[in-house]
Amino acid sequence: MKMNRSGCLIVTVITLLAFELLTAHAALRQQPPYPQSSVIKRVEFDFATHRRLAPGSDNWPVTWADDGHLYTAWGDGGGFGGTNSEGRVKLGVARIDGNVEGYSGINIWGGFKPQKPPQFDGKSYGIISVDGVLYMWVAAQPARHMESSAIAQSTDHGMHWKLADWKYTFEDELSVPTFLNFGQDNSGARDEYVYSYLIEPTWGPGTLPQTEHGFDVHKPGRIHLTRVPKELVFQRDRHQFFAGFATDGSATWSSNIEAKQPVFEDSNGVGWNVSVSYNAGLRRYILCTEHSQSHAGQLGMFDASEPWGPWTTVAYENSWGEGQIETSAFFWNFTQKWISADGAKFTMIFSGKNSNDSWNTIDGRFILPAPDLQ
């Protein structure tokens, strides 16, 4: 079949337009929101060290408690020793015993053969130990975690939990919080406050994304920051919101929720969850979240000298783990217990969809710039 000159021209134009659109879309997806870090040159992962436990249970935020153990929370599964169906709970808490070379997990609140049964449902992407007390952010179920978030407290290392009598709601433009973790039992904290990061939602609970899994990144992507005196975490009226910078560049705070301003922004979107921890060896705050697409290994990793920035980019991955694991991770987080004294080597915890719907750890290292010899 022959095509006339006009037909060839139309096909050529359509092809060029499609190519330009695809190229522009790819460039948008891959362009990080902040300049490259001057402290961390890049990050490398050793997938030969990948370890997977607790199939069917996801999320796994962690904190290093006063008793030397790690404590963590999972969702929709049986936890350690369980499966997606056996021992399944919507929210469970576990303890990680041992060092990074030979750790094991024990279900202490919910899940398969737990020490205590669960007391309520939800999902958690933030847990912290402060002065021997565990606090956990609990996002409401159902409604894809966006409806509301409340703080729970445990004074017996996760055996029993008490929920606060107040919540942040979708109408507050805040969702799925996480705690900023420092060292063991929050030692090494910069001050006497406990900090939380909260995502500004752009979908849910009544407007769920029309995706295969019902989740997506939030665009435009904005993350907010709160602080509260460490002995008053349960008191809503003592929580303050980051409200921008003073003329001298210092952070300002307000008890008025309407005064809040984001500390992190990415026009490509941020995930519906986030983790932030302090790397004492590098003296940097490390923030991990998704970008561009959810459940696809779109890892954004950023660092800063203060909890509110300014942020720089450590990694901005498309299909993180491709060729090594399924590219379906959506949550990554660190614990200072599993970071070397110089801050360069680490074991990271991550979770995701399908085969990554489990507890996962992997070793890695931050590559630092060569020392200035001048």
Image (cartoon, grey):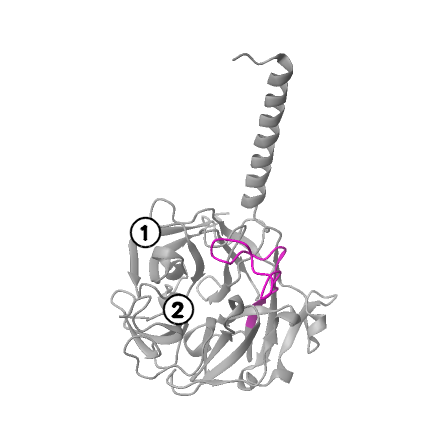
Which segment did they paint magenta? Answer: 196-222
Q: Residues within 10 Å of mark 1 (few under 14, many from 20)?
A: some
Which residue is situated farthest in the front direction here? 1
Tell me, yes or no, if residue 191 can be seen here.
no
| Residue lying at 72% horizontally and 68% vertically, measured from the top left | 246
Residue 133 sits in quarter: bottom left
Main SS of residues in magenta:
loop
The residue type indicated by label 2 comes to Asp
Q: Residue beneath label 2, please? A: 76
Q: Position of residue 169 (x, y in %)?
A: 61, 73
| Residue lying at 59% horizontally and 64% vertically, measured from the top left | 204
Q: Nearer the viewer, mark 2 or mark 1?
A: 2
Image-based side of 322 in relation to 302, left or right: left
Residue 47's disc number: 1
Q: Nearer the viewer, residue 14 or 276?
A: 14
Measure how far apart labels 2 and 1 are at the Cα level. 26 Å
